[in-house]
Image (spheres, coloured by chain):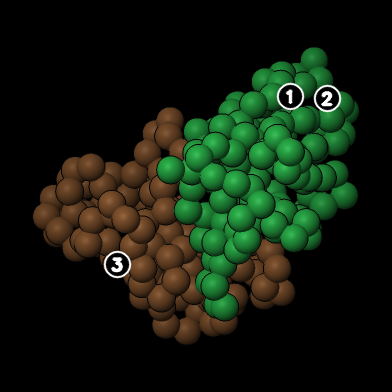
């Protein structure tokens, strides 16, 4: 299967920790990348590879992977972290890309 | 700093061909090690990968769109393009271009254009 499944929505209290998960068969072979998208804006890469952050991404964002599940963790969530988050990975063929269904994160 | 900018028709009639261009500035599209992708997002919905072209010229397309999609590169103009034929209302979306980076067991889209809205309507 080439699908990546995410929970539709999660909420987190300001300053607390939230984990967003992404499930799919291809994640047993390939790492996920993670994107933050705020309303009306293009997505922004926040995590790639095993657990790499592009320049400018706060270290409260981290990634991990186990079996068929990839996770994005926000430790000490801030109000500005409220956004939609998408995972992406290669499909089982390795040649195509597939996005997760997306998770809306609300910071309370 | 590399930047991407989409351009093209914002309104396309059903059954016609959607054409978009992504201009690359601040760097060369011929730089090795990168791929150049198109990604779309229907209003209120999630992201969908359309396809990409490698610096080598190899192309890979979403199997669900493969029969209608062509991605090409114009190195002289430092840009790449998307053509999507036989469009319907379901192709209405914001279309993004993005640069891809790949490792042995990972891939990522590290630079994105701002996106351009395309509406399919008569």
Q: Residue at x 56, y 32 (%)?
A: B5
Label 3 to label 1: alpha-carbon separation: 39 Å
Chain of the residue under the numbered disc 1 shown in the image: B
The answer to which image quadrant residue B45 occupies is: top right
Looking at the image, residue A40 lies above or below residue B13: below
Q: Colour of chain A?
A: brown
Image quarter (top left, top right, bottom left or bottom right) of the N terminus of chain B: top left
Left or right for A63, reference B34: left
Residue designated by label 3? A62
Label 1: few (<14), some (14–19) or many (≥20) C-alpha neighbours in 10 Å: many
Residue A41: image location, x then y, percent: 43, 34
**SS of the residue at dot 3?**
strand
Chain of the residue under the numbered disc 2 shown in the image: B
Residue B46: image location, x then y, percent: 54, 45
Image quarter (top left, top right, bottom left or bottom right) of the C terminus of chain B: top right
Relative to the observer, which residue lies in front, A85 or A50?
Answer: A50
Residue designated by label 1? B120
| Mark seen at residue B14 | 2
Left or right for A104, reference B87: left
């Amino acid at each position: 299967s080439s699908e990546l499944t995410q929970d539709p929505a999660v909420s987190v209290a300001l300053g607390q920790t939230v984990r967003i998960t992404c499930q799919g068969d291809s994640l047993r072979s390939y790492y996920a990348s993670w994107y933050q998208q705020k309303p009306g804006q293009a997505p922004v890469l926040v995590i790639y590879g095993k657990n790499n952050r592009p320049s400018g991404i706060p270290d409260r964002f981290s990634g991990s992977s186990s079996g068929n599940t990839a996770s994005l963790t926000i430790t000490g969530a801030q109000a500005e972290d409220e956004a939609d988050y998408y995972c992406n990975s290669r499909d089982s063929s390795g040649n195509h890309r597939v996005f997760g269904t997306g998770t809306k994160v609300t910071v309370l | 700093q590399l930047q991407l900018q989409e351009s093209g028709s914002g309104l396309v009639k059903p059954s016609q061909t959607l054409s978009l261009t992504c201009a690359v500035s601040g760097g060369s599209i011929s730089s090795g090690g990168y791929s150049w992708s198109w990604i779309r997002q229907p209003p209120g919905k999630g992201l969908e990968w359309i396809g990409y072209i490698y610096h080598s010229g190899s192309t890979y397309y979403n199997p669900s769109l493969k029969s209608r999609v062509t991605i090409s590169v114009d190195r002289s103009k430092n840009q790449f393009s998307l053509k999507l034929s036989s469009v319907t209302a379901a192709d209405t979306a914001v279309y993004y271009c993005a640069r891809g980076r790949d490792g042995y067991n990972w891939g990522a889209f590290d630079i994105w254009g701002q996106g351009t809205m395309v509406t399919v309507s008569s």
